Image (cartoon, rainbow, N blue to C red):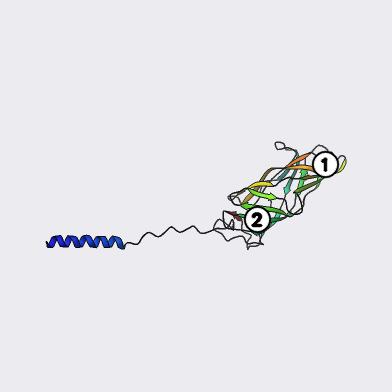
């Protein structure tokens, strides 16, 4: 009888011990991260008002060709841009910026009759820049009008001015391994200028690394 009583007490104690084990804590939700962070995915958020800058990626050129599969047109070895960050919500939202400056330099042409490139400029700045949100990088027209490019060319026939407009928006990609933004064969249609100018043009360029020049050391920008 005594043995049976001891066994019952031991079983009751074991039951109480099991019941005393605390329940597993609920899984903790991952910390929110901004769409644009500096350095890497865990870096500080890019702040509204920060200045974002990039030039052509090392070893690349900006091209403005007359066909998607051709190599005839204007090639530029220099093309910096500047943008001002506007919004930077938590991922997977969409960050926005205003592209306020974009220029081209060291340009050459291999078009028959063209002897040199006097200038290649963009018009109707500022443009709207969107990144993140699981969407492509989008560069769209701003309040001033469509995205526009104008080339002034020295030729056998004198100075030619060729003006082109983009009917929609650039849709590019971002790469966090190189912190670059790339655009391929963005289609422009001639909107003015000499009858000797090609009727359309296709713009391609890779910019990077994208950096936040408002922060010490101008850290690269990571798109989450």
Q: CA distance from mark 2 to mark 1?
A: 40 Å
Please state, as top left, top right, bottom left or bottom right, where the N terminus lies in the image: bottom left
Q: Quadrant of residue 185?
A: top right
Residue under circle 2? 96
Q: Which mark is residue 6?
A: none
Decide if residue 127 is in sight here.
yes
Residue under circle 1? 115
Secondary structure type for disc 1: strand
220, 187: nearer the viewer: 187
Residue furthest to the right in view is: 158
Instruction: Name which of mark 2 and mark 1 comes first in the sequence.
Output: 2
203, 109: nearer the viewer: 203
Q: Quadrant of residue 94?
A: bottom right
Decide if residue 56 is in sight here.
no
Mark closer to the observer (2, 1): 2
In the rendered image, residue 74, in percent from the top left (x then y), is placed at 76, 43
Left or right: 217 with respect to 165? Answer: left
Residue in view at x 31 percent, y 63 percent: 20
In the rendered image, residue 3, in percent from the top left (x then y), is placed at 13, 61
In the rendered image, residue 162, in percent from the top left (x then y), is placed at 81, 44
In the rendered image, residue 125, in percent from the top left (x then y), is placed at 75, 54
197, 59: nearer the viewer: 197
Secondary structure type for disc 2: strand
Left or right: 26 with respect to 11? Answer: right
Neighbourhood count class around disc 1 (C-alpha, 10 Å): few under 14, some 14–19, many 20 upward = some
Compared with residue 97, is residue 195 higher up or lower down, i.e. above or below?
A: above
Neighbourhood count class around disc 2 (C-alpha, 10 Å): few under 14, some 14–19, many 20 upward = many
């Amino acid at each position: 009888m005594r043995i049976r009583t001891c066994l019952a007490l031991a079983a009751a104690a074991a039951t109480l011990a099991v019941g005393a084990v605390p329940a597993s804590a609920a899984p903790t939700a991952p910390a929110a991260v901004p769409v644009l962070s500096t350095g890497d995915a865990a870096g500080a958020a890019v702040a509204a008002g920060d200045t974002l800058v990039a030039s052509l990626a090392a070893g690349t050129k900006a091209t403005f060709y007359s066909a998607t599969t051709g190599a005839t047109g204007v090639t530029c070895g220099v093309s910096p841009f500047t943008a001002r960050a506007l919004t930077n919500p938590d991922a997977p939202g969409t960050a926005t910026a205003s592209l306020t400056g974009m220029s081209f330099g060291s340009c050459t042409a291999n078009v028959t009759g063209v002897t040199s490139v006097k200038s290649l400029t963009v018009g109707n700045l500022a443009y709207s820049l969107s990144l993140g949100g699981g969407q492509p990088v989008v560069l769209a027209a701003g309040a001033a009008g469509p995205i526009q490019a104008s080339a002034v060319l020295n030729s056998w026939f004198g100075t030619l001015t060729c003006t082109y407009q983009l009917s929609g928006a650039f849709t590019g990609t971002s790469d966090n391994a190189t912190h670059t933004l790339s655009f391929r064969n963005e289609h422009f249609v001639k909107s003015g200028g000499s009858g000797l100018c090609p009727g359309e043009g296709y713009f391609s360029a890779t910019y990077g690394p994208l950096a936040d020049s408002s922060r010490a050391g101008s850290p690269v920008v990571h798109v989450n």
